[in-house]
Structures are given as structure tokens and as C-alpha cells.
Amino acid sequence: MLWKKQIPLAITFITGLVFGIQYFVPHRTSENLFNAYVDWEIVIGIFGGILAYISFYRAHTMRIRKKAPAWQYSLVAIGISLLMIFFGFIQGTETGTFFSNMYFYVLVSIEGTMFSLLAFYISSAAYRAFRARSAQATALLIAAIIVMLGRIPLGEQLSFWKLIWSNAPSFTDIANWILNIPNMAAKRAMNLGIGLGIMMLSLKIVLGIERSYMGSGD
Amino acid sequence: MAELKQEKTFWEKLVQIDRRFIYLIIALAMTLPFFFQMGLPIPATKEVKDIYDLIETFKPNDVVILSADFDPSVSPELLPMFDAMFRHCLKAGVKVIAMSLYIQGPGLIEPVINQAAKDYNKVNGIDYAFLGWQYGYNLVVINMMENLKQTFPVDYYGERTEDLPILGNVNNYADYDLITSMNGSSTYMTWLLYAHEPYNVPMACGVTAVSAADVYPYIQSGQFIGMLGGLKGAAEYETLISEKRMATMGMEAQNWAHIFIILFIIIGNIGFFIIGRKK
């Protein structure tokens, strides 16, 4: 219990308090302390990375051993990662190497494809869900359409009223106004709320009130 | 009991268009414009022009840091931004340092850097530096504000940064004249918290269109000089440097994709209203 609860709580309390004060003390000792902390964080992070790799191989080898559903994918995951590490060490990572080619012609393409699929899903979802059911939904719908038109060059051409009154705002101008005024006001309010929430949670963690980060439902 | 199958009315069909048809239309709207380009003008917005104008005022020894903090999933939007800004820096003759807080970043920007350097006859280590990636996100930012060469002992190609002529007088935050982070998440906050706030280093950012709305409060407060928002931001920058490249071409596709999405939304709402009235 001492190792699992009291000691982590004490470390959190002491470091939280020390570095909370350290931020406001412009003294060399204070700066040295912070630099030492930065070095420690890098070392801990690197060990965390090693732990992550071990955990990755362990999880996937377990899946293969137990012949869990779709265990073949685990085989591919382990195989590819070892292959990349091997060729990375042998040939390096410069352009034209196996590592670089796998990166550009496999990983970049896969990630790009995954993300670009969103365009199709969003189009279908917008058509089905974007309905003017209430006053608020209608306001959202109109704002969304204006911003979408304002974010493309064609939006400027579609601002037909500018032919009659050249000083009138175009779709681009209205979209910029929406983003700069109502959107910014809402975002700022949200950011302030989030900031206060982070401060409260940090205080609760330092004081040992919030303990869920230690796991086991504490 | 024979089940009576009611024929769908035109309006009911209108609100139930097969999703495969929508996918097909969007696919065509995004691919055909690459072959049939309209070449519409893309005027620069204030947020983009402010960054361009600042770089234009820089002298040859001024330092611009471009951090490509993104992975391949968002590279279609962010890579053209990096390309346009890197080219502008080379053109303006300022010292440009390319780096990344993401491990996947350097691999993405290396071909872009090489191509731009070739086009402008610039040499790595003399006209620009490519530092690559270093582990630690916020720790990298914190460290490089105090000592750049200690944070990046070697560049992307393994050359000692101490030996790079371009970094001769570049040591810490006092030497950085602009930092621009291009990111698909909120990595710009890392730079804001650990570079701009404590050291007052001028900052700008490039973000995906979907994240652009989050950045406006920081522009209005003066923490960011400007922002490149999505592919349009990159295309606007290309217009400013008079080089129509990846982003300008991509905007042709975005033009029609947006128009068709809007048309589908309007069609859906027309059907929804008429059915609602009849009921």
C-alpha cells in the first residue's frame, strides 16, 4: 500500500508544490532545478518508449499464441515493425532506402486514404443530418453554408450582389466575420472554462483529492 | 394478409438518396477539377497576409523556424503550407530552419525541402538548416529556447549543428525572429506556452481547416501574428509568393466538393420541408 499509494501521492504533492513555486522564482537555483527536471523527463520518456515497444510485442505475441480472432494482423504488425527496424539500422532512413520507400509508398498512402475517406462520410452525413428542424439548427445550417462558400474561391464569384453594390460583403467577408466575431467569442468562453477546469483538476491531483490517475479505482 | 407496399413519393426519394450515389458525385467532384481547372483568383485574407508581410520585412540574417508538426494523415493540407512558406523564406533570403516535433514530420518535408532548394539554388547548412526530429515535444521547445545546438546536436543528415555555417550566430530565443508551427492538432499550444509566452518570440501557425476556428482568439490577442487555415490558407500564400503549386491545384477540387455538399444539404432540406408540410 505504501509503494502503491502513499509514495506516489507524496511525490505528486511535493513536485507539484515545488514546481508551482519554481515558475515564479527567477533565481539560478530555481532554473537549475527546472533544467534537471527537463533532463529527467527526457530519460523517463525514453524508458516509457522502450516499455511501450515491449508492451506492443507482448500484446501481439499473446494474440498469436492464443489464436485470437484476426490474429494474423498481429503477425503482420510484428513482422512489419521488425522489418522497418532492421532496414532502418542497415540502410538508414534517407530518401531511396527501403525504410523511406515503405514510409512514403505504404504508410503515407494508408494514412492519407484513411483521412480522405472522411470527405465521403461527411458529405453523406451532412446530407442526412443537416436539417433545419429548429431556429438554432437553421442558424447553424446558414452559418455552415456561408463558411463553406467563404472557404472556396468560387464563393467570391457566387456573391452576385456585388455586381449591384460593389462595397457589399462577399461570402468570404461574411465567413471571416463569422469566424472572427461570434466564433471567437464562443471559443474564448470555452477556453476560459477549460483553463479553469485544468487548474482545478491540477490542484485536486496535487492535493491528492483526485486519484484516478493511479488506477485501481482509487 | 397481403402487405401493401406503398410507392415512395418524389419528395421521399429526395431525402433518401443512396449514399453510394453521394460518394460517386463527391469522388467525381474531387477528381475531375484536377483535369479541368477554372483558375479562379484566390485573394489572401488578413491572417495570411500578415505572415507574408512580416517575412518581407526581414533582413538576410533574420531567422525563421518552420516546424512541421504533422503526420501523413493531414499532410495534403499542411505540406503545401510548409512548401509555400519555405519557398518564401528562401526567396526572401532569410535564414530558415526546418524541424519537426513529430517523428513522421521530417520524412514528409525532406522531398519538399530538396525540391525548393534545387529550384532556388540554395545549399543545406549555408542557406537553410534541416534539423529533423528530436524526442520530447514540449521539452524540445523548452530546450531550444535556451540552446538550439545543444537541443539538436546533429541535423537530419547527421552533420554537427556546431559546424553548420547558417547556425553560426543562432543560439537561443533572442535569435529567433519568427516561429511557425504547422500542425493538425493543438501542437501550436506547446509553442505558444513554452516559446511565445516566456520568451516573447513572434509566432504564427498553420492548421487544418477544421482546427482553424480554434486559433482566432490567439490572433485577436496578438499572440499569433497570423494563421494559414487549411488548404485555402496555403493557396492564399502561394498566390502571395506568385507560385501556383499543390494548394492552388487542390483548391479546384475543394471548390466543387463544397458546392456539391451544399447542394446535397439544400436538396435534403427541400424534401424535409415538403414532406413535413404534407403531414
Image (cartoon, coloured by chain):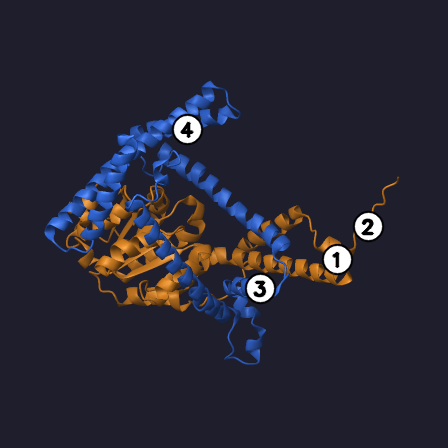
Chain colours: A blue, B orange
**Residue at 37% over, 30% down:** A84
Is label 3 on the same chain as label 1?
Answer: no
What chain letter is assigned to the residue under label 1? Answer: B
Question: In the image, which is nearer the foreground, mark 4 or mark 2?
Answer: 2
* Residue B7's disc number: 2
The residue closer to the viewer here, B56 or B211, is B211
Q: How far apart are marks 1 and 2 (CA)?
A: 12 Å
Q: Residues within 10 Å of mark 2 (few under 14, many from 20)?
A: few
Is label 3 on the same chain as label 4?
Answer: yes
Q: Do the residues labelled 3 and 4 touch (CB within 8 Å)?
A: no
Secondary element at tag 1: helix
**Residue at 66% over, 60% down:** B269
* Residue A214's disc number: none
Q: How far apart are marks 3 and 1 (CA)?
A: 24 Å
Can you say whether B161 is above or below A134 in the image?
above
Answer left or right for B160 relative to B221.
left
Tag 4: residue type? Ile
Image coordinates of residue B256 in percent, x first then y, are 57, 58
Q: Mark 1 points at which residue?
A: B11
Q: Residue furthest left?
A: A28
Is label 2 on the same chain as label 3?
Answer: no
Answer left or right for B194 relative to B187.
left
Q: Mark 3 points at which residue?
A: A136
**Residue at 42% over, 44% down:** B72
* Residue A80's disc number: 4
